[in-house]
Image (tube, rainbow, N blue to C red):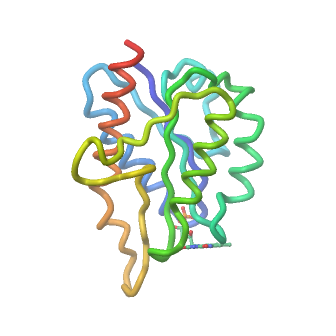
Protein backbone atom coordinates (compact mmCIF):
# COMPACT_ATOMS: atom_id res chain seq x y z
CA UNK A 1 0.00 0.00 0.00
CA UNK A 2 1.31 3.43 -0.98
CA UNK A 3 1.30 6.32 1.51
CA UNK A 4 2.60 9.89 1.11
CA UNK A 5 3.90 12.56 3.46
CA UNK A 6 3.85 16.07 2.01
CA UNK A 7 5.39 19.07 3.76
CA UNK A 8 6.58 22.64 3.52
CA UNK A 9 9.92 23.38 5.14
CA UNK A 10 12.25 26.35 4.89
CA UNK A 11 14.95 25.45 7.43
CA UNK A 12 14.68 21.65 7.49
CA UNK A 13 12.81 20.83 10.71
CA UNK A 14 9.52 19.85 9.08
CA UNK A 15 11.39 17.93 6.37
CA UNK A 16 13.22 16.02 9.12
CA UNK A 17 9.90 15.23 10.84
CA UNK A 18 8.48 13.99 7.51
CA UNK A 19 11.44 11.64 7.09
CA UNK A 20 10.89 10.22 10.57
CA UNK A 21 7.19 9.63 9.79
CA UNK A 22 8.20 7.83 6.57
CA UNK A 23 10.58 5.65 8.59
CA UNK A 24 7.70 4.62 10.88
CA UNK A 25 5.39 3.96 7.93
CA UNK A 26 7.90 1.88 6.01
CA UNK A 27 8.44 -0.31 9.09
CA UNK A 28 4.91 -1.67 8.56
CA UNK A 29 4.60 -4.71 6.27
CA UNK A 30 3.36 -4.06 2.72
CA UNK A 31 3.74 -0.27 2.96
CA UNK A 32 5.64 1.89 0.46
CA UNK A 33 5.80 5.43 1.84
CA UNK A 34 7.46 8.47 0.28
CA UNK A 35 7.91 12.07 1.42
CA UNK A 36 7.63 15.08 -0.87
CA UNK A 37 8.15 18.80 -0.48
CA UNK A 38 5.13 20.74 -1.79
CA UNK A 39 7.52 22.00 -4.47
CA UNK A 40 8.36 18.48 -5.72
CA UNK A 41 5.22 16.38 -5.39
CA UNK A 42 5.09 13.24 -7.55
CA UNK A 43 1.45 13.65 -8.56
CA UNK A 44 1.14 10.18 -10.11
CA UNK A 45 2.38 8.54 -6.88
CA UNK A 46 0.09 10.66 -4.71
CA UNK A 47 -2.96 9.80 -6.82
CA UNK A 48 -2.28 6.11 -6.08
CA UNK A 49 -1.86 6.40 -2.28
CA UNK A 50 -4.46 5.36 0.29
CA UNK A 51 -3.28 7.87 2.90
CA UNK A 52 -1.67 11.31 2.98
CA UNK A 53 -0.02 13.08 5.92
CA UNK A 54 0.65 16.80 5.55
CA UNK A 55 2.98 18.91 7.68
CA UNK A 56 3.87 22.55 8.17
CA UNK A 57 5.90 24.77 10.47
CA UNK A 58 3.88 27.12 12.64
CA UNK A 59 4.06 30.60 11.14
CA UNK A 60 2.42 32.98 13.62
CA UNK A 61 0.07 30.12 14.60
CA UNK A 62 -0.87 29.37 10.98
CA UNK A 63 0.34 26.92 8.34
CA UNK A 64 2.81 28.56 5.96
CA UNK A 65 1.29 30.70 3.19
CA UNK A 66 2.96 28.42 0.61
CA UNK A 67 1.35 25.30 2.10
CA UNK A 68 -2.02 27.02 2.27
CA UNK A 69 -1.81 28.05 -1.38
CA UNK A 70 -0.80 24.50 -2.36
CA UNK A 71 -3.31 22.65 -0.15
CA UNK A 72 -6.42 24.61 -1.04
CA UNK A 73 -6.71 23.24 -4.61
CA UNK A 74 -4.60 20.08 -4.12
CA UNK A 75 -7.23 18.19 -2.13
CA UNK A 76 -9.51 18.15 -5.17
CA UNK A 77 -6.82 18.20 -7.86
CA UNK A 78 -5.02 15.13 -6.47
CA UNK A 79 -8.24 13.23 -5.68
CA UNK A 80 -7.74 13.08 -1.90
CA UNK A 81 -11.45 12.58 -1.03
CA UNK A 82 -12.05 9.25 0.72
CA UNK A 83 -8.37 8.76 1.56
CA UNK A 84 -6.93 8.62 5.08
CA UNK A 85 -5.52 12.00 6.15
CA UNK A 86 -3.27 13.11 8.97
CA UNK A 87 -1.25 16.16 9.91
CA UNK A 88 1.84 17.23 11.84
CA UNK A 89 3.73 20.41 12.58
CA UNK A 90 6.91 21.89 13.95
CA UNK A 91 7.27 25.00 16.04
CA UNK A 92 9.92 26.94 17.91
CA UNK A 93 8.20 27.17 21.30
CA UNK A 94 5.89 24.94 23.34
CA UNK A 95 3.13 27.55 23.06
CA UNK A 96 3.92 28.13 19.37
CA UNK A 97 0.53 26.78 18.19
CA UNK A 98 1.62 23.65 16.33
CA UNK A 99 -1.71 22.11 17.35
CA UNK A 100 -3.61 24.92 15.64
CA UNK A 101 -1.62 24.29 12.48
CA UNK A 102 -2.52 20.59 12.60
CA UNK A 103 -6.16 21.47 13.24
CA UNK A 104 -6.36 23.74 10.19
CA UNK A 105 -4.74 21.14 7.92
CA UNK A 106 -7.20 18.49 9.19
CA UNK A 107 -10.10 20.92 8.64
CA UNK A 108 -9.12 21.30 4.98
CA UNK A 109 -8.89 17.53 4.65
CA UNK A 110 -12.31 16.98 6.24
CA UNK A 111 -13.84 19.68 4.05
CA UNK A 112 -12.54 17.78 1.04
CA UNK A 113 -14.05 14.47 2.19
CA UNK A 114 -10.97 12.78 3.65
CA UNK A 115 -11.09 10.36 6.60
CA UNK A 116 -8.83 11.83 9.28
CA UNK A 117 -6.78 9.93 11.84
CA UNK A 118 -4.52 11.20 14.61
CA UNK A 119 -3.05 8.08 16.20
CA UNK A 120 -4.11 9.86 19.38
CA UNK A 121 -4.43 9.03 23.06
CA UNK A 122 -6.51 5.89 22.42
CA UNK A 123 -3.27 4.26 21.27
CA UNK A 124 -1.59 4.93 24.65
CA UNK A 125 1.84 6.45 25.15
CA UNK A 126 3.12 8.58 23.56
CA UNK A 127 -0.08 10.67 23.63
CA UNK A 128 -0.24 12.41 20.26
CA UNK A 129 -3.73 13.93 20.45
CA UNK A 130 -4.30 15.70 17.09
CA UNK A 131 -0.94 14.58 15.70
CA UNK A 132 2.76 14.97 16.44
CA UNK A 133 4.37 18.37 17.03
CA UNK A 134 8.14 18.89 17.05
CA UNK A 135 9.51 21.76 19.14
CA UNK A 136 12.91 22.84 17.90
CA UNK A 137 14.10 25.36 20.46
CA UNK A 138 12.35 26.35 23.69
CA UNK A 139 15.08 27.29 26.17
CA UNK A 140 17.69 25.14 24.51
CA UNK A 141 20.74 26.46 22.71
CA UNK A 142 20.76 23.63 20.18
CA UNK A 143 18.11 22.34 17.79
CA UNK A 144 15.97 20.05 19.96
CA UNK A 145 14.01 18.28 17.21
CA UNK A 146 15.81 15.03 18.00
CA UNK A 147 13.83 14.83 21.28
CA UNK A 148 10.67 14.36 19.20
CA UNK A 149 12.04 11.75 16.79
CA UNK A 150 10.32 8.77 18.40
CA UNK A 151 6.92 10.51 18.41
CA UNK A 152 7.09 11.04 14.65
CA UNK A 153 8.22 7.46 14.02
CA UNK A 154 5.42 6.06 16.22
CA UNK A 155 2.89 8.33 14.49
CA UNK A 156 3.99 7.03 11.07
CA UNK A 157 3.62 3.45 12.29
CA UNK A 158 0.14 4.06 13.75
CA UNK A 159 -1.03 5.86 10.60
CA UNK A 160 0.21 3.09 8.32
CA UNK A 161 -1.35 0.36 10.47
CA UNK A 162 -4.70 2.18 10.39
CA UNK A 163 -4.47 2.62 6.61
CA UNK A 164 -3.82 -1.12 6.19
CA UNK A 165 -6.70 -1.97 8.56
CA UNK A 166 -9.15 0.30 6.71
CA UNK A 167 -8.15 -0.01 3.08
CA UNK A 168 -6.47 -3.32 2.38
C1 LIG B 1 7.67 33.77 9.57
C2 LIG B 1 7.83 32.79 10.71
C3 LIG B 1 6.87 32.70 11.69
C4 LIG B 1 7.02 31.81 12.75
N1 LIG B 1 6.05 31.72 13.71
C5 LIG B 1 6.17 30.84 14.73
C6 LIG B 1 5.15 30.72 15.71
O1 LIG B 1 4.11 31.37 15.67
N2 LIG B 1 5.33 29.82 16.72
C7 LIG B 1 6.47 29.06 16.81
O2 LIG B 1 6.60 28.29 17.76
N3 LIG B 1 7.44 29.14 15.87
C8 LIG B 1 7.31 30.01 14.83
N4 LIG B 1 8.28 30.06 13.87
C9 LIG B 1 9.37 29.08 13.93
C10 LIG B 1 9.11 27.88 13.04
O3 LIG B 1 7.78 27.41 13.14
C11 LIG B 1 10.02 26.71 13.44
O4 LIG B 1 11.36 27.10 13.50
C12 LIG B 1 9.84 25.54 12.45
O5 LIG B 1 10.38 24.36 13.01
C13 LIG B 1 10.50 25.82 11.12
O6 LIG B 1 10.27 24.73 10.26
P1 LIG B 1 11.21 24.41 9.02
O7 LIG B 1 12.63 24.23 9.57
O8 LIG B 1 10.67 23.16 8.46
O9 LIG B 1 11.12 25.57 8.08
C14 LIG B 1 8.16 30.96 12.82
C15 LIG B 1 9.14 31.05 11.82
C16 LIG B 1 8.99 31.96 10.78
C17 LIG B 1 10.05 32.01 9.71
Depicted 58 relative to depicted 8: above or below: below
For the C terminus, give its image quadrant: top left
For the N terminus, give its image quadrant: top left
Residue 64 or 101: which is nearer the viewer?
Answer: 101
Residue shown at 51%/59% (left/top)?
99
Q: Going by the picture, which residue comes out furthest to the left?
A: 125
Residue shown at 49%/21% (left/top)?
50
Q: Is residue 111 left or right of residue 7?
A: right
Depicted 39 relative to depicted 33: above or below: below
Residue 64, how many percent across, how many down? 68, 59
Residue 72, how many percent across, how many down? 75, 41
Residue shown at 65%/58% (left/top)?
63
Count of all numbered marks drawn on residues in the image:
0
Depicted 14 relative to depicted 27: above or below: below
Residue 16, how many percent across, how many down? 43, 56
Q: Image quarter for residue 148?
A: bottom left
Question: Ligand 1 quadrant?
Answer: bottom right
Residue 49, how many percent across, how many down? 51, 22
Residue shown at 62%/34% (left/top)?
110
Q: Going by the picture, which residue comes out furthest to the top?
A: 168
Residue 121 or 105: which is nearer the viewer?
Answer: 121
Q: Is residue 36 left or right of residue 167?
A: right
Amino acid sequence: MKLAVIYDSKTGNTKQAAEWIIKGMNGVADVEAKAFSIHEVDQEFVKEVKGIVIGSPSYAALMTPDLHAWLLPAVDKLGMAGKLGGAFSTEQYTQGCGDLVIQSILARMLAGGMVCYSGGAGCGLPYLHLGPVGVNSNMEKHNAMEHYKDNFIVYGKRFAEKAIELFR
